Amino acid sequence: MATAIIIAGMHRSGTSATTGALRLCGISLGKGLLEGAADNPKGYFENERAVQIHEKLLAELGRSWDDVRELPAGWMNSVAAAEAKAEVRRLIETEFAGEELWAVKDPRICRFIPLWREVLEPLGIRVAAMHVVRRPGEVAPSISARNGWGRESGELLWLRHVFVGEAHTRDVPRSVLSYETLLKEPATSIVRALGQMGVTIDVEAQAASRLSAFVEAKDRHHVESQTGGQTDGGLTELVNAAYAGLVAIEQGCGTWQSVEALARRSYEWLKG
C-alpha cells in the first residue's frame, strides 16, 4: 500500500527544511516545486499545483492563508470543495502514480486535511501526518519580519494551524518533529519521526552527510532560548503550553490528549 505523508505545520516553522530533508532521503514531492525566494532561498519544497489548489479554494471560501477564522460551516459540501477534490485526484494520478512513498507540504494543507483524506483513502493510499513545530516565540517575529505583523497575529495563526492540523489527524499514524531537534540531529530526527508513523527508511552515511549540509543552524534567523512568556492565562502562555505539549510527544513523554485539552482552551481566541 502506498503512503502519503502530510506535512502539517505553521508557516515559518521549519516545514521547508523538513520537507527538503525528506526529499534528500528519497521521498517524492511530485514534479513541479515552488522556487525559493529571499525569505527561503533553499526552496519551499511545496508542490506548485497543490498550493494553487489551496489558494483557489481559500479564495472561493472567502478566506486567505493568513485568516485565523474558521472555514465556513459546511465547506466540505461546497461546489468549490468538490472541484478542489477533483483537482487533487488529478494531481495524485499525474505526479504520484506508482510512488510507494510520497509527501505533500504546504502550511495551508493543515486546514484542508479532510479534503485530501476524502481523495486519498478511497484510492487505497495510507495517510500519515508529520506535525512540524517551532517555538511560537520564534515564529511570530519571523512572520513579523516578513509580513510586518504584530506578535499576537502570528500567535493566533500558529494556534489555528497547529490545532486544526491536530484535530484532523487523530485517527491516522502521526508524529511530531520540532525544528529545534531537526537542526540538532537531522538524520536521526527524520528517521525517528518517520518510524513513529510506521515508515522505515535507511539513511546511509552519504545521505546523512547531505542532510547535515542542507539543514543548517544559520538558516534559523530568530532564536528564543526558552518558551517563557506570560503566566496569566494569556495568549502567549497558551501557545507556549501547546508547543511544550507537542515537544513532549516528540520526546516520548507527552500525550495527544493534553494537546487536545489545550485546543479546547483556545476556542475563545480562535472563534469567529
Image: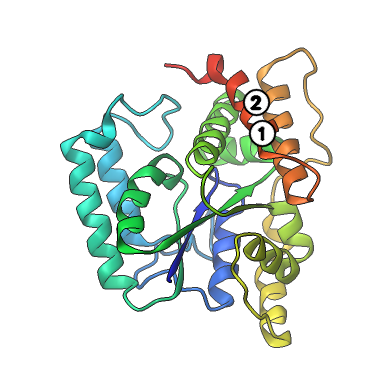
Q: Residues within 10 Å of mark 1 (few under 14, many from 20)?
A: few
Q: Which residue is mark 2?
A: 261
How has the structure been colored for display?
Answer: rainbow
Q: Is residue 35 above or below residue 135?
A: below
Q: Residue at 28% across / 50% down in the picture?
A: 53
What is the x, y in percent for residue 130?
57, 54
Q: Residue at 74% across / 53% down in the picture?
A: 180
Query: Is residue 4 found left or right of 19 in the rendered image?
Result: left
Q: Is residue 200 above or below residue 62?
A: below
Question: Closest to the observer: 269 or 164?
Answer: 164
- Which amino acid lies under the numbered mark 1 shown in the image of this protein? Gln
Q: Residues within 10 Å of mark 2 (few under 14, many from 20)?
A: few
What is the x, y in percent for residue 249?
73, 45
Tag 2's secondary structure? Answer: helix
Q: Residue at 80% across / 17% down in the picture?
A: 231
Q: Is residue 223 visible?
A: no
Q: Are marks 2 and 1 in contact (CB under 8 Å)?
A: yes
